[in-house]
Image (tube, rainbow, N blue to C red):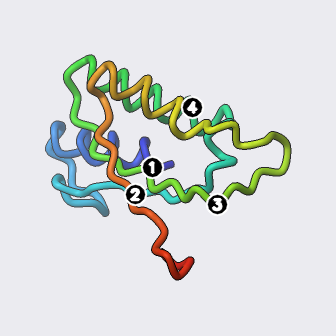
Amino acid sequence: PAVGRALGAQLAAHLGVSGPLRSDAVSYVSVGDGSVNNAHFLAATNLADYAQFRGFRCPVVFGISDNDLCISLRGYASIRVVSSCKKKRRTITEYSSSRRATGGW
């Protein structure tokens, strides 16, 4: 839904249609690192990537929590693999935080 919201807000602004979102809205979704292996997540990032390639604005932020929890697969550093592929094509900007010595964020 995050990518659809982002593209929908841009399309409504382009068509001059008023909607529930402002034309400068940014869509946000928060997932755990297990979702990075999920087809829904990969399809969303690919759609955002394709929209940018085609010249459409797709203001979406994917907040990924690296909690090392995944029901069906081990993490296998999937976040780093996906983000490194997207960064090579310059379609993603990565921001990260690290755990403090106290174990908190």
Q: Amino acid at mark 4?
A: Leu
Are the residues tagged 3 and 4 within 8 Å (C-beta)? Answer: no
Q: Callout 3, which amino acid?
A: Asn
Q: Say which of marks 2 and 3 sits in front.
A: 3
Which mark is in front, 1 or 3? 3
Q: Earlier in the sequence, mark 2 or mark 1?
A: 1
Badge number at residue 28:
2
Q: CA distance from mark 2 to mark 3?
A: 19 Å
Mark 3 or mark 4: whose residue is earlier in sequence: 4
Q: Contact (CB < 8 A) between labels 2 and 1?
A: yes
**Callout 3: SS:** loop
In the rendered image, which residue does mark 1 sit on?
2
**Badge 1 or badge 4: first in the primary sequence:** 1
CA distance for labels 1 and 4: 13 Å
Mark 2 and mark 1: span between their CA atoms?
6 Å
Question: What kind of residue is marked 1?
Answer: Ala
Mark 3: few/some/many CA within 10 Å (<14, 14-19, 20+): few
Q: Residue at x 54, y 40 (%)?
A: 79
**What kind of residue is marked 2?**
Tyr
- Residue denoted by label 4: 42
Mark with earlier residue (4, 2): 2
How many residues crowd around disc 4 within 10 Å: few (fewer than 14), some, or many (20 or more)? some
Q: Residue at x 38, y 32 (%)?
A: 48
- Please name which of the two marks, 3 or 4, marks the residue nearer to the observer: 3
Residue 52: x %, y % from top left: 27, 26
Q: CA distance from mark 3 to mark 4?
A: 19 Å
Secondary structure beneath label 4: helix
* Residue 104, numbered label: none
Kindly check if marks 4 and 2 are in contact, taking CB atoms under 8 A apart as contact: no
Mark 1 and mark 3: Cα distance apart in space: 21 Å
> Residue 72: x, y in percent?
85, 43
Disc assigned to residue 67: 3
